Amino acid sequence: MVGATGLGGCATKKYVREQIAPVSARVDTIEAKLQETDGTAKAALAEAQAASGQAQQNGQRLDQLNGRVDSVDQRLTVQERRVKRPRN
Amino acid sequence: MINLILALAGLASVSAADDLQAGAKPPETEATASVESLRVADWIATSGDNRKLPYIIVDKANASLRMFDGKGKPLGVFPVLIGVAVGDDATPGVGSKNLAEIGPAEKTTPAGRFLARFGIAVGKERVLWVDYATSVALHPIPKTVSPKERRRQRMLSPTADDNRITFGCINVPAAFYSKTVRPMFQRKGGYVYVLPDTKPLEEVFPRLRVQALTSARIR
């Protein structure tokens, strides 16, 4: 009687495999998606970092140009001998 | 806005009825500044774009300016009169025209970043040239303008709508000009940042794009 009850409570390996299979498949799918998302995120981060670096470079270039414009502007004001009338 | 009104009330109370009382403490600025003005001020302060020179931010939409010393310390907000036409560019060649030749649509105060310096203008008058090429200067209300233009009253009024009257120059209260602008800009000049009427802020000040990116990265 006890043995029969014990046997009835145990699941067979086949039964367990059958139950786990769909869960395992879902886990595999999620893992694959996770890896894909991770890859996309890493690529996006790399692109953002590259863009940030480029923006920094552009900013520095802008600063250099601003400096040159400033000096040209200054020279223009100094060199212009004609006395101008401001636009009031 | 309240501070600007206070500033204007201060203007109105001057017995000489000319301008802000000499030596009067200017009102605080931060509470009244527009978002655009704050953005530009933040960028200048963090990037050091003013190269340790004093600077002014002209907010055309609010017909006011904010003055800062070389270290970025705000010195006050003051009303201004600006070009009668809405627009952010100067017509090519406008700087060489006589006042009478300048058409209504050409009377804009150009937006941008300008290295301003004092220089001699017609009549041996010294003005702060903001954009010498297009003849835009910052100075008090000229004595030669017609009283019909009611420039002083426009400057005193609490609204910004009637402050568009000049040919493109930036008119400021005389006492502010003589007590603050002249001593600070006299030797090495300074920067004048004119906020746009219609153009996007980043188009006029491209460095703001980088500033936004850097700020986002810090966060």
Image (cartoon, coloured by chain):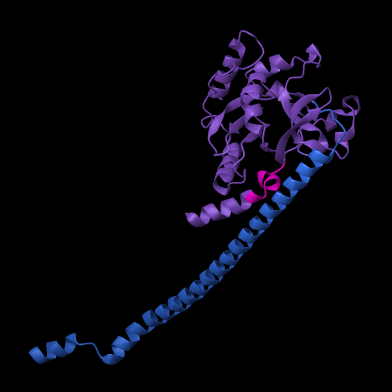
Chain colours: A blue, B purple
User: Is residue B168 something that shows in the picture?
Assistant: no
Q: B27 and B188: which one is in front?
A: B188
Q: Is residue A39 left or right of residue A79?
A: left
Q: Position of residue B215 (x, y in %)?
A: 53, 52
Q: Which quadrant of the figure has residue B88?
A: top right
Q: Residue at x 53, y 24 (%)?
A: B27
Q: Which quadrant of the figure has residue B41?
A: top right
Q: Is residue B15 above or below residue B38?
A: above
Tell me, yes or no, whether the highlighted magenta stretch contains residue B131.
no
Q: Position of residue A86 (x, y in %)?
A: 81, 28
Q: Residue at x 57, y 38 (%)?
A: B38
Query: Please, which residue is most extreme toward the front here?
Result: B187
Q: Residue at x 67, y 13 (%)?
A: B18
Q: B89 and B51: which one is in front?
A: B51
Q: How many marks?
A: 0
Image quarter in which the N terminus of chain B is found: top right
Q: B85 and B125: which one is in front?
A: B125
Q: Position of residue A62 (x, y in %)?
A: 68, 54
Range of residues picked out in magenta: B198-207
Q: B164 and B130: which one is in front?
A: B130
Q: Residue at x 63, y 35 (%)?
A: B57
Query: Please, which residue is most extreme toward the right here?
Result: B101
Q: Is residue A49 above or below residue B46?
A: below
Q: Is residue A20 above or below residue B115?
A: below
Tell me, yes or no, whether the highlighted magenta stretch contains residue B201.
yes
Q: Is residue A3 left or right of residue A88?
A: left
